[in-house]
Image: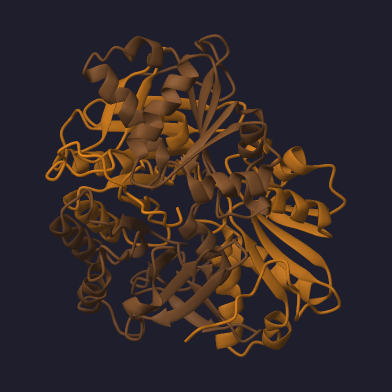
Chain colours: A brown, B orange
C-alpha cells in the first residue's frame, strides 16, 4: 500500500498553527547541527527535553524565544504527553534529543504516547491525531565517534542498547551472541551506569569468546563537544572502567583493522569487502544507492 | 591505549596547506546538510565523487570554486588515490558521499587506500600519511526514511548491505538469518540492482520464515530529495518490484508497530521496551547517554 508522504514542513492538520517536532541535536557541535533542526529550535514556542539537551539547544541555536521545559531523565512519556497537549492547544513545540531522535531517543516515546492514547481511545486521541507531527533526524553518537577514527561502521553493523531497564538482560545477551556469530561490527549505546555496573563487563566477556583479543574497540565520549575524548583499544585490553554512560562503544568484527596514523593516533576501519571473497578487486559497494 | 583526538578542524600535518575531507551529503536536502559539510564544499579546491553526488553538492552548497572531478561508480579506490595525490600536493580536497560517508560509502575506501599504500610500503606512503585527513559524518538514508514514518529504528537494529559484489551471498543470508533470530529491526542498503535481481526476494523469503506477515516494512526512496517516495507495507505484501537501488528497506522486528496517522498515512515505530518485560512502566531508556 502506497501512502502519501507527510513532509515535516507541511502542516495540513495543524490545529490553530500548532505543531510538534522531535528534533535531534546531533553530536553536540554547531557544525553538525542540521539547519532544519536549528530552524525548528528558533521557531518553537516551547522547548521540551532532558535538561542537558535543552541547554545544548540554547547553546547551539540560541538565543531562543521558546519557553524552556527542562526535565530530569526517566520521564520520556510525560514529556511526550506534555508536548502533545501544548501542540494541540496551538503552540509550536519542539521535543529535543541528543544525536538522532529516532535512535534510542524521544521519537519513539512521542509516537508511543500517541499510539497509547489512540489505542485506549483516550480523551485526547482526536486532538493529538490532528497535530502536525514531524521528526528531524540527526547524526547519532556512533556515527560521530566512527568519523573521528576512520570508518569502523563501513560495513554491516548492529546497534544495540545495553540497558536492561526496558528489556531483559537475557534478550541483550542473546542479541550480542547472535550479532557476534554473524560477525557484525557492534555499536553499543547505554553501555554502563551506576545502576547497571556489571553488564558491560559481561558483554565484553561474551564477545571475547567469539572475537580475537586484537579486535579493535573504539570508545567515544562526548564526541563533537568540548570535552570530547576518543580511545582506541582492543577487545583484549578494554575494561568497563574506561567507559561511562556518556560513552558509545564500537566493537569491530573479525574484518575490522587498525593501523597508525601519521599524527600518532590510530585509524580504524572495516573494509567494504568480506575476507572470504576479498581478492582486492576494485568493485563498487554501492552502485549509487542512497547512503 | 588512549590516543589524542585528531580534530577535523586541525591540520598539524598538512603539507603546504592541503587537506582531505570525506564529506557526507546527508539525505539530499539543504535542511539536513551539516554546516561543517557545506563549509568543506565551499573551501575545497577539488571535489571528487560519483557524479550525481558531485552535482548534489553543487546544488546544496554551491556555487563552489572547486574543480569538479565527477566519476562513474565502481571506481572508489581510484577516487581515493586521486584524492590523496591532490591533497599531498597541497590542495584542499573533498571526497563526497551521499548520506554518511562512514556507512557503506567513501570513508572506508579512503582509509583502505591509505592502509594499502602503507602496508605495501608504496612510494606515496609517507606523503599520504602526512595529509590531514578528516571525515564529516552525515544523516544516513535509513535515518531519513525512519524520520518520515515515525521511529522504526527506535530500538536495537542492524544495518546490512544486500550487495554480494564484495561479499559472498552465503554471508549475507547467514547475517539475515542471525539478525532475524535476534529479533532485530533491519535496515537494508543496496537492496537490488539490475545486476542483482533475485537477492532481495530471497531475503524477504528468508525473513518470512522468522517474522509474521504483518511485520511492518518501510521503503524509502530519495528521501529528502524532490522525488521522495515513502511506502509503508508489510512483510507479507512487499515485493521486490517495489524496490530499486535508490531505496532503503526497513523491516521491523516482532515488536514493531504500525497505526494510522491523522493525515491518512501510517506511523511505524519500535517501542523502547521489549515485550517480555513490557509492563508499560515508564522508565528511561537512555539515562542521558549520548545518542
Q: Nearer the viewer, residue A32 or B230?
A: A32
Residue A190 in view here: yes
Q: State the residue at coordinates (66%, 48%).
A: A60
Q: Tell me: B61 left or right of A238.
A: right
Q: Position of residue B73 (x, y in %)?
A: 60, 52
Q: Position of residue A259 (x, y in %)?
A: 52, 83
Q: State the residue at coordinates (67%, 82%).
A: B129
Q: Nearer the viewer, residue B123 or B148?
A: B148
Quarter assignment of residue B272: top left
* A61 vs A229: above or below: above
Q: Nearer the viewer, residue B238 or A130?
A: A130
* B202 vs A92: above or below: below
Q: Tell me: A13 left or right of B219.
A: right
Residue A5 in view here: no
Q: Position of residue B55 (x, y in %)?
A: 72, 42
- Tag count in the figure? 0
Quarter assignment of residue A242: bottom left
Q: Position of residue A287 (x, y in %)?
A: 52, 49
Q: State the residue at coordinates (53%, 27%).
A: A93
* A160 vs B217: above or below: below
Quarter assignment of residue A124: top left
Amino acid at each position: 500500500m502506497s501512502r502519501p508522504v507527510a513532509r515535516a514542513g507541511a502542516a495540513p492538520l495543524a490545529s490553530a498553527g500548532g505543531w510538534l517536532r522531535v528534533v535531534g541535536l546531533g553530536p553536540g557541535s554547531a557544525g553538525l547541527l542540521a539547519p532544519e533542526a536549528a530552524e525548528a529550535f528558533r521557531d518553537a514556542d516551547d522547548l521540551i527535553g532532558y535538561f542537558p539537551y535543552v541547554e545544548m539547544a540554547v547553546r547551539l541555536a540560541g538565543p531562543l524565544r521558546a519557553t524552556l521545559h527542562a526535565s530530569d531523565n526517566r520521564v520520556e512519556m510525560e514529556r511526550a504527553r506534555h508536548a502533545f497537549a501544548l501542540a494541540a492547544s496551538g503552540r509550536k513545540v519542539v521535543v529535543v534529543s541528543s544525536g538522532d531522535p529516532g535512535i534510542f531517543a524521544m521519537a519513539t516515546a512521542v509516537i508511543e504516547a500517541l499510539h497509547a492514547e489512540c489505542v485506549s481511545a483516550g480523551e485526547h486521541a482526536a486532538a493529538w491525531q490532528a497535530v502536525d507531527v514531524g521528526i528531524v533526524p540527526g547524526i547519532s553518537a556512533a556515527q560521530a565517534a566512527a568519523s573521528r577514527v576512520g570508518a569502523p561502521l563501513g560495513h554491516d553493523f548492529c546497534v544495540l542498547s545495553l540497558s536492561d531497564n526496558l528489556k531483559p538482560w537475557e534478550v541483550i545477551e542473546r542479541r550480542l551472541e547472535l550479532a557476534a556469530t554473524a560477525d557484525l561490527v557492534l555499536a553499543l549505546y547505554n553501555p554502563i551506569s551506576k545502576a547497571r555496573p556489571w553488564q558491560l563487563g559481561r558483554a565484553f566477556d561474551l564477545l571475547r569468546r567469539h572475537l580475537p583479543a586484537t579486535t579493535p574497540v573504539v570508545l567515544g565520549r562526548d564526541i563533537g563537544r568540548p570535552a570530547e575524548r576518543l580511545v582506541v583499544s582492543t577487545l583484549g585490553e578494554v575494561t568497563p572502567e574506561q567507559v561511562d554512560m556518556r560513552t558509545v562503544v564500537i566493537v569491530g568484527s573479525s574484518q575490522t583493522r587498525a593501523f597508525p596514523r601519521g599524527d600518532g593516533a590510530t585509524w580504524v576501519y572495516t573494509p567494504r569487502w568480506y575476507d572470504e571473497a576479498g581478492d582486492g578487486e576494485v568493485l563498487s559497494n554501492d552502485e549509487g544507492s542512497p547512503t
